[in-house]
Each structure stands twice: as structure tokens, then as C-alpha cells.
Image (cartoon, rainbow, N blue to C red):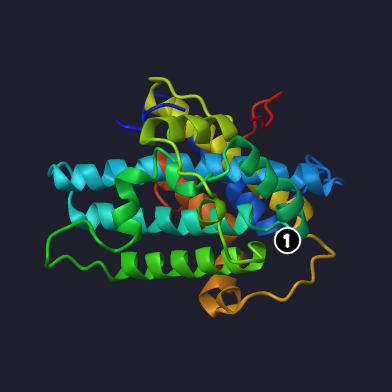
Amino acid sequence: MGDPDGPADAVPAWDYAESCRRLADLGERGLLTPEVEPCESPDELFWFRWLTGHQVCFVVWRLIAQLVDDLDQGRRSADEVLPQISHYVDGYSAMLLYTGSCPPDVYNVLIRPSMRLRHRAFSGAWAPDYWPIRDLFRRRRLPGSSDTDVSELLDAITLLHLVHDGVAARLVTNGRSLLREAAVRGPGHRPAGLIYDSYFTTLRAPVPRHEVVAQLLRRLVAIAQDVAANGLYAAGDADERPAELQKPEVVKCENSLVDILLGVAQHACGLPSQPLPTFRMKPGRGVSL
């Protein structure tokens, strides 16, 4: 994973718009051809979602951090930056729903033990890209001046907390994270980041922004294909949803998940929200991670 800083115009807009068009089509009509078969293995499906959804979060967090820095340094105005940050926060909420869509038994038998094997105190707070913007998510440091209208961003952050708490209540049956359960202290900041990146199969190197955007788009299209083929929740997953996940705004986020991903893609690409130009698919091109 590289640095998303800098302009997003290093590659032809054709490539970006094509991916956005595919996301729009998946959101409107689903899978029109059997390009992705339904997954028959719950372990494989939800392991893919756990890793891929988190990798998307890493890029989204970096994009948010860059926008906050642009605003702080006077490179962009609050009117330009705040709507984009709000959309990215909604994208983060969508990814929490996506990664947390596994049945509780899959989480507690497969996913949680895999994190504990890496470190008994494994924690999402170790993510290197989370630290620069954690105060924003905690409403401690909102971008802009004192007279900036941040109501849209606050609504997005409120939704984020609802989703986070709801997913945690659904999956963490005893209510205690690995960090709280551990009888040992976590490693220092840098080793923790290395452990976290290793677990989520993430490598870091200086690469152009367009390569980071391309990585993001591949994953967003794959996620949209997955949801279209398999649904957000497993067919037999009839567990009662926690109160947080039954809130109308959370249900709306679930039902609009692919549309939210499209918005994230368009902002990352620097493309207008609507309309998208129509292109023919290049022969032989497919989606891969």
C-alpha cells in the first residue's frame, strides 16, 4: 500500500470511470452475467470480506487524513473538503457492516482466534492509518474553523459509532475485546503496526497515488460483485440484530452499501458524482485483487 497523496489524474480517466460505471451497474441491476459465482464456503467468503474490507478502510483513512491536511494547510476550502470526508466516513461505516457481516460463530471460531494467534492483545487501534484521524472519529478534533458547518460530518460520525457498536454487540458475545481480555500489554506503536499490516497482508512502499486508487477500485468492484452474488448476510443467519443495527439510518446504509462504495470511488478518482460517461469494456479485462 502506498501514499494516496497527490492528484488523481496520473492515469486516463477512462480507467477510473470504467470501474465507477461497473459499480453503478452493480448497484442498480446486480450481476447481469455469472461473472462471480455464489461462494459455497462460509469460511472462505467471510475471510475474504474480513481482509478485503479492512484493506479498503486503510485507503479510506489515508484519503481522509490527506483531506484534513489539505484543509489545515489552506490548500482546499472547507466547503470542498467536508462533503468528501463525510462520504469517506460513510464508506468506513459500510465497510464495518461488510466485514462484520459474518455469522457470530464464524467470527468466534475463525476470525477472532486468528487475530489472537498474531498477538493476544491484537487491536484495531494498532492500524497505522487510523492514528492520524482517530480524534476526528472521536469528535475531539473536527476539521475547519469554529464557524464551519460540520453537521453532515457529525451525522456521518454518529452513524459510524452506531454501526461499530452494533457490529461489536452482534459478534463479540462476551463484550470484551482481545485487548481487554489479554493479560499482557500490547507492543509499541511501530511493532504493533507491523503486526497489524502483516495480519491483513498489507505491504507499504512509496507508490504513485493512481496505483493506490487502482487498488481501491479493484477491491470496491470485487466487494460489490460479492454482495450482488452472495447478499450481505448469510442465508441462514437469522440472529437477532442488536438495537443499533435496527436503527433506520443503519438499515439505510446496509441497503445503500454499493451506492456508498460508488461515492467513495468517485471521490477518490476525482470524478463528478453524476453522470458517468458510458464506455465499452476493454476485451479481456477482469477484476482481480
Residue 168, compared with residue 266, is above or below; it is below
Residue 49, compared with residue 253, is above or below; it is above
Q: Picture coordinates of residue 254 (x, y %)?
A: 60, 65
> How dense is the environment of label 1, judged by Cα within 10 Å: few (below 14), some, or many (20 and up)?
some
- Judging depth in this view, the residue of 246 and 26 nearest the camera is 246
Name the residue rendered at 22%, 56% in the picture: 143
- Judging depth in this view, the residue of 216 and 18 nearest the camera is 216
Residue 3, compared with residue 137, is above or below; it is above
Name the residue rendered at 55%, 50% in the picture: 182
Which corner quadrant of the image does residue 116 belong to?
Answer: top right
Task: Identify residue type, mark 1.
Answer: Pro
Q: Picture coordinates of residue 246 (x, y %)?
A: 60, 78
Q: Position of 70 compared to 133: left or right? A: left
Would residue 208 be visible to someone looking at this image? Answer: yes
The residue at which mark 1 appears reads as 104
Q: Picture coordinates of residue 233 (x, y %)?
A: 73, 61
Would residue 221 be visible to someone looking at this image? Answer: no
Q: Picture coordinates of residue 223 (x, y %)?
A: 64, 46
Name the residue rendered at 28%, 71% in the picture: 151
Q: In the current view of this chain or complex, which residue is farthest to the top?
A: 206
Q: Assign a secondary structure to mark 1.
A: helix
Q: Quadrant of the C terminus?
A: top right
Q: In the current view of this chain or complex, which residue is farthest to the right?
A: 40
Residue 151, compared with residue 200, is above or below; it is below
Name the residue rendered at 62%, 42% in the picture: 115
Which corner quadrant of the image does residue 174 belong to?
Answer: bottom right
User: How many numbered callouts?
Assistant: 1
